Amino acid sequence: MPFDPVYIVGTERSGSNLLRLVLNAHSRIAVPHPLHLLRFFAPMEAAYGDLSVEANFARLVDDVLWLKRVHIHPWEVPIDRDRLLAEACPRDAMGIKGALYDQVRTAEGKVRWGCKSTFMVHYSERALARDPGARFVLLIRDPRDVAASSRRSVFSTFHPWLTARLWREQQALGLDLADRLGPAAVHVLRYEDLLADPAGRIEALCTFLEEPFEEAMLRFHETEDARTSARLSESWQNTARPVLGQNAGKYRQDLSRDEIALVEAEAGRLMDRLGYPRDVREADLPSPSALDLLRFRARDLGWRLQVEARSLRRDRNHWRRWARNASMRYLSLRNRILPPGA
């Protein structure tokens, strides 16, 4: 059986938390809640200087461990800093990520790890450089439902047009990866198909991963991991429930006709390729002006403030999320002001 890592890639609010818990329920696969390590550290990695210099690399390792300490979904597994310094290969953020996950899977008595950071669709080449046999699960969901879900979540963009633009970009990257690597390395999974036939789709996923199907994967919602997620954030409340078969097509109640048209104007061609029928005729699709885009961003900020206010009242990890974001901004600023050796 293979031991190569598994990456869930695509766009947030597409069922990736559900799929993480499904895979984590397997006896051989460890999929902790993601630190989004590459998302945070890849843009400022160069600021650490030459990472072959031990002091520079140690500084990066220490900052990654800081991210782990303030993570919005606390990791129970203790991480050995000396092991990270010794085992990270290559000597960069990707190498640290692999060594970090190796410690998690070892602590959990598993032989393979998975990563649910959907943003890894932007860093697939780095993942393959470290692990040429890595497998990718490209998770796809109707962008209109993604937009409807994103507007209620603290972890996403809020305006449907902005969400549709992000969806188009990330799904295009994922499909390009699938075209280049083929079905042996990239498994395309539609969220709607997973809802309609959980057992069949999970069995097919196990076949792709060359792992035996386990009934426990269908009972993911009974795990302590799932219950913890549901308690931490309103955005994750469905993780403690079985697969919600009716959780598709809800955008028709949650988005206005104009908002649906905006999503289809931005993502329609990719929707056609992926088999999502449009609701709006091509001739009726809008062409937003520069002024419209400014209005969209202003409305996005307004929705963000509303969702943040609700999160302050309802989410147990609200302050951890703020602490994480503040920590990453501090590290970015510090690395610009105080270069290595300063």
Image: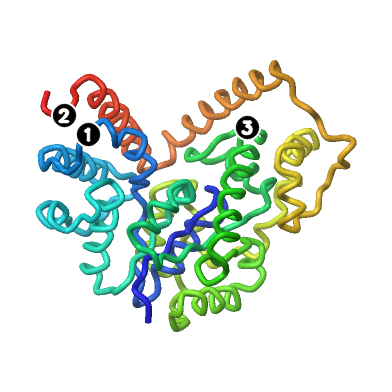
Q: Nearer the viewer, residue 168 or 107?
A: 168
Residue 132 quadrant = bottom left
* Element at label 1: helix
**Residue 23 x, y percent position in the rendering:** 43, 69
- The residue wearing badge 1 is 48
- The residue wearing badge 2 is 340
Marking on residue 159? 3
Q: Are marks 2 and 1 in contact (CB under 8 Å)?
A: yes
Q: Is residue 111 left or right of residue 267?
A: left
**Residue 68 x, y percent position in the rendering:** 25, 46
Residue 322 quadrant = top left
Q: Measuring 11% from the left and 27% from the top, which residue is drawn there?
A: 341
Q: Measuring 21% from the left and 67% from the top, which residue is drawn there?
A: 107
Q: Nearer the viewer, residue 37 or 191?
A: 37
Q: CA distance from mark 2 to mark 3?
A: 39 Å
Q: Nearer the viewer, residue 6 or 178?
A: 178
Mark nearer the viewer, 2 or 3: 2
